Each structure stands twice: as structure tokens, then as C-alpha cells.
Image (cartoon, grey):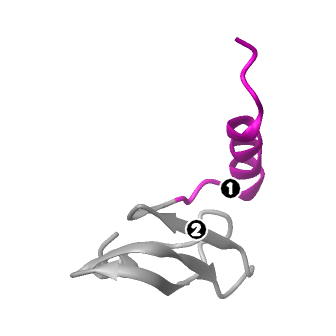
Amino acid sequence: MRHDLMDILACPLCKGALSLTVTREEGLEVLEGALQCAACSETYPIAEGIPNLLPPDLRRAMDAAAAAPSGH
């Protein structure tokens, strides 16, 4: 994710302003980190340069499904 995306991103839940915490970046790209909403305190992870702005309930459901063993 590029730093200049911060100008257009907003919290998908409450439309509040997001702040960026960077844990790993390469050049102009943020590869790992988080976006935090100042208004509702929700946190959105950034992994492999991609911010996950899904609502928290849907994000948790997708994480649980990915962690579940497949029934093959």
C-alpha cells in the first residue's frame, strides 16, 4: 500500500479518519502494518502491501474459515 492512499482511505464502519502504523516497508510501499480508526478504534491489518478493510465480523469469519482444516 502506498502512503498517498491515506488521503482517500476512511474507516468502512464509521467513515472516520485512519492513522497508519508501519511495521515493514520497502521503498514507498507499506508491506506490513495496520490502519487504526480514530473515531471507533477499529484496527485494519495491512499484509503483503494490501490493507484489509473488511468489516471486523466478516474478517474474523474469513480468518476462521482459512484456519479450519479442509475436509478432503
**Residue at 60% across, 63% down:** 12
Question: Is 35 situated left or right of 25 in this image?
Answer: right
Specify whether residue 70 is painted magenta. yes
Q: Nearer the viewer, residue 54 or 22?
A: 22
In the picture, the quarter occupied by the N terminus is: bottom left
Q: Nearer the viewer, residue 51 or 72?
A: 72
Q: Nearer the viewer, mark 2 or mark 1?
A: 2
The image quadrant of residue 36 is bottom right
Q: Position of residue 59 (x, y in %)?
A: 69, 51
Q: So how many labels did they put on this image?
A: 2
Mark 2 and mark 1 in contact? Answer it, CB < 8 Å.
no
Question: Is 4 situated left or right of 52 in this image?
Answer: left
Q: Position of residue 29 (x, y in %)?
A: 28, 75
- What amino acid type is highlighted by mark number 2? Pro
Span of residues in magenta: 52-72
In the picture, the quarter occupied by the C terminus is: top right
**Residue at 77% across, 42% down:** 64
- SS at mark 2 in the image: strand
Q: Position of residue 69 (x, y in %)?
A: 76, 29
Residue assigned mark 1: 55
Q: Position of residue 54 (x, y in %)?
A: 61, 54
Q: CA distance from mark 2 to mark 1?
A: 11 Å
Binning the other alpha carbons within 10 Å of mark 2 as few (below 14), some (14 to 19) or many (20 upward) gives: some
Residue assigned mark 2: 45
The image quadrant of residue 39 is bottom right
**Residue at 54% across, 59% down:** 52
